[in-house]
């Protein structure tokens, strides 16, 4: 815990000088003094405080409700045999690595979406968001296929030593494969929430959608944990976050950016079909390879190859564009 705290502080300190160089210090100082004068005026401070709370509260409460999923899972797992919470924790951390990679895309393109929305360019924002959703879907589905294909080998390679036995590996891998079912939902929620909070006005819809997903997680988890243990909890997590993603997609189309949910869902459906084929091929390769390092390496070749072939055959728009760009790069390389 101390190492994490020190590492986090160092991340801030390393970035701070570069951040400060970007700031117009004199202008920022003048703006701050002007805001102080406004807040000091009669009735000024309550107004500023009210605006700040109205803008921040929906974001903060959404973040809290999303993290509450983890608290629900750990509470339900506390009634299981010792080690269940650890299996959930290890499985969740590894299976969500593809989600972190995928969310780099909407993080980088967020200024483009925000600028388009501020300028009233709804069609530009729509095209950007729809493209981002398919791009993050490619990364998430490809990552989920790989995790499902060689989960036991990955867990064994990363953790099986000392007190982490073969039984712990099997239990963690089982949970990891179930978590992978909700990986696309988690990624879509992270991508969809950005344009919601880029709008000029605060919106409470994401909190309501997350509340529905959290309720599904609680109810489904309380039922599933009795029959399937930690894997049932992971399945409830996947169901809850997927429901939230679907609600956010519908809400975004009707309230913020006029995306076409049917078009996006059609593209994601074709990606899922490609992911199923890739996961099956990678699973077969991983089981036949034997040693964990070899299994992970061969699956890392087989899964993307089959996924790319499936996405190309099913004509997933963004996948076809990426593959065409890669082909042009290869041809241009001497």
Image: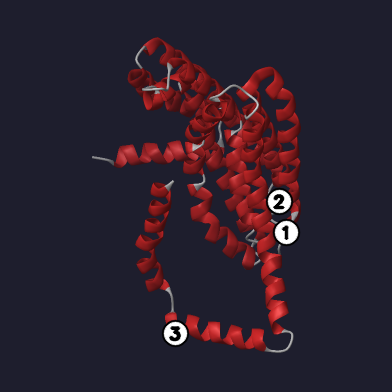
Query: What color scheme is it?
Result: secondary structure
Residue contact at pointers 2 and 3, CB within 8 angstroms: no
- Callout 1 crowding tier (Cα within 10 Å): few <14, some 14–19, many ≥20: some
Residue name at image x 75 percent, y 38 percent? 215
Q: Secondary structure at mark 3?
A: helix
Residue contact at pointers 2 and 1, CB within 8 angstroms: yes
Q: Which x, y percent locates residue 160?
A: 39, 22
Residue 202 visible, this angle: yes
Disc 2 and disc 1: Cα gap in Å?
7 Å
Say which residue label 3 marks.
26
Residue name at image x 67 percent, y 37 percent? 72
Quadrant housing residue 323:
top left
* Position of residue 220 in the picture relative to residue 332 (left or right): right
Q: Which x, y percent locates residue 206?
A: 71, 51
Q: Which x, y percent locates residue 237?
A: 65, 33
The correct choice, above or below, for 221 with respect to 324 in the image is above
Mark closer to the chain start, 3 or 1: 3
The correct choice, above or below, for 236 with respect to 10 in the image is above
Quadrant housing residue 116:
bottom right
Question: Dividing the image into 4 quarters, which one contains the C terminus?
Answer: top left
Say which residue label 1 marks.
203
The correct choice, above or below, for 277 with respect to 15 in the image is above
Disc count in the image? Answer: 3
Disc 3 and disc 1: Cα gap in Å?
33 Å
Residue contact at pointers 3 and 1, CB within 8 angstroms: no
Closer to us: 100 or 162: 162
Say which residue label 2 marks.
206
Closer to us: 214 or 22: 214
């Amino acid at each position: 815990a101390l190492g994490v705290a020190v590492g986090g502080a160092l991340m801030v300190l390393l970035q701070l000088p570069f951040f400060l160089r970007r700031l117009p210090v004199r202008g920022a100082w003048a703006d701050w003094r002007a805001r102080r004068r406004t807040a000091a005026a009669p009735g000024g401070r309550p107004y500023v405080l009210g605006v700040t709370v109205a803008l921040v509260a929906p974001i903060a409460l959404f973040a809290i409700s999303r993290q509450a999923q983890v608290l629900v899972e750990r509470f339900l797992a506390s009634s299981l045999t010792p080690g269940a919470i650890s299996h959930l924790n290890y499985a969740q951390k590894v299976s969500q690595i593809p989600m972190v990679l995928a969310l780099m895309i909407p993080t980088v393109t967020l200024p483009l979406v925000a600028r388009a929305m501020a300028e009233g360019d709804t069609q530009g924002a729509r095209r950007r968001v729809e493209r981002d959703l398919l791009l993050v879907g490619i990364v998430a589905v490809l990552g989920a296929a790989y995790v499902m294909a060689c989960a036991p080998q990955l867990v064994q390679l990363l953790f099986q030593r000392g007190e982490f036995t073969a039984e712990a590996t099997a239990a963690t891998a089982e949970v990891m494969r179930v978590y992978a079912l909700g990986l696309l939902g988690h990624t879509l929620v992270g991508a969809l929430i950005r344009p919601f909070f880029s709008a000029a006005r605060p919106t409470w819809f994401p909190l309501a959608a997350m509340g529905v997903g959290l309720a599904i997680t609680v109810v489904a988890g309380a039922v599933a944990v009795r029959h399937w243990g930690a894997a049932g909890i992971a399945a409830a997590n996947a169901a809850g976050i997927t429901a939230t993603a679907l609600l956010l997609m519908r809400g975004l189309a009707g309230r913020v950016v006029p995306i076409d949910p049917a078009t996006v869902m059609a593209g994601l459906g074709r990606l899922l079909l490609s992911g199923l084929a890739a996961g099956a091929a990678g699973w077969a390769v991983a089981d036949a390879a034997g040693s964990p390092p070899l299994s992970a390496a061969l699956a890392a070749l087989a899964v993307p190859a089959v996924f790319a072939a499936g996405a190309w055959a099913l004509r997933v728009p963004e996948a076809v564009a990426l593959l065409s760009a890669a082909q042009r790069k290869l041809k241009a390389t001497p």
